[in-house]
Amino acid sequence: MIWYIVKLLVSAGIIVLISELSKKLPLLASLIASLPLVSVLGMVWMYGEKVETEKIAAHAEGTFWYVLPSLPMFLVMPWMMKKGISFPASLAAGVALTGVLYLLMTKALAKFGMNL
């Protein structure tokens, strides 16, 4: 039970830190948010729970391939908002684009024998 509380507090603490920091130092908050903290914490939590290293390695490799199609969202959203499109609409478009790119990435990798 203590392990789950630690995981919860550390994970939530990072999110709160980023959101609070973004109010005063948005570029620093962006830098922290861009770090693969969620992936690293996930792997640390997996390791702490004695998950097989093969599964941790598969998680790391899958994360690499899924990060690539998520990156355009961070260009599309600010572009749309600078054009006067609302945040909710820009976010929805970014998420939809990411979903389409995930599907395309999964299909492309399957052609090379990688099934994510």
Image: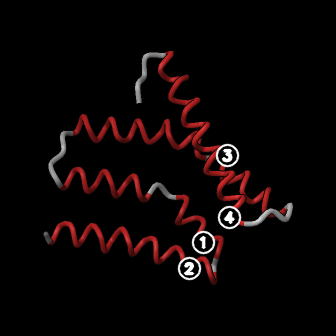
User: Distance between the Cα atoms at labels 2 and 3?
Assistant: 24 Å
Mark earlier in primary sequence (3, 1): 1
Q: Which residue is mark 4?
A: 88
- Neighbours of disc 2 within 10 Å: few (<14), some (14-19), many (20+): some
Q: Secondary structure at mark 4?
A: helix
Is the residue 116 above or below the residue 26 in the image? Answer: above
User: Distance between the Cα atoms at labels 4 and 2?
Assistant: 22 Å
Contact between labelled residues 3 and 2, with CB atoms less than 8 Å apart:
no
Mark earlier in primary sequence (2, 3): 2
Q: Amino acid at mark 2?
A: Leu
Q: Nearer the viewer, mark 3 or mark 1?
A: 3
Is the residue 16 above or below the residue 98 in the image? Answer: below
Q: Which residue is mark 2?
A: 21
Contact between labelled residues 2 and 1, with CB atoms less than 8 Å apart:
yes
Picture residue at 76% right of the left edge, 66% below the top: 86
Q: Which residue is mark 1?
A: 28
Query: The C terminus appears in which quarter of the rendering?
Result: top left
Q: Secondary structure at mark 2?
A: helix
Is the residue 104 above or below the residue 112 in the image? Answer: below
Q: Residue 12 bears which disc, if any?
A: none
Q: Nearer the viewer, mark 4 or mark 3?
A: 4
Mark earlier in primary sequence (1, 2): 2
User: Distance between the Cα atoms at labels 1 and 2?
Assistant: 7 Å
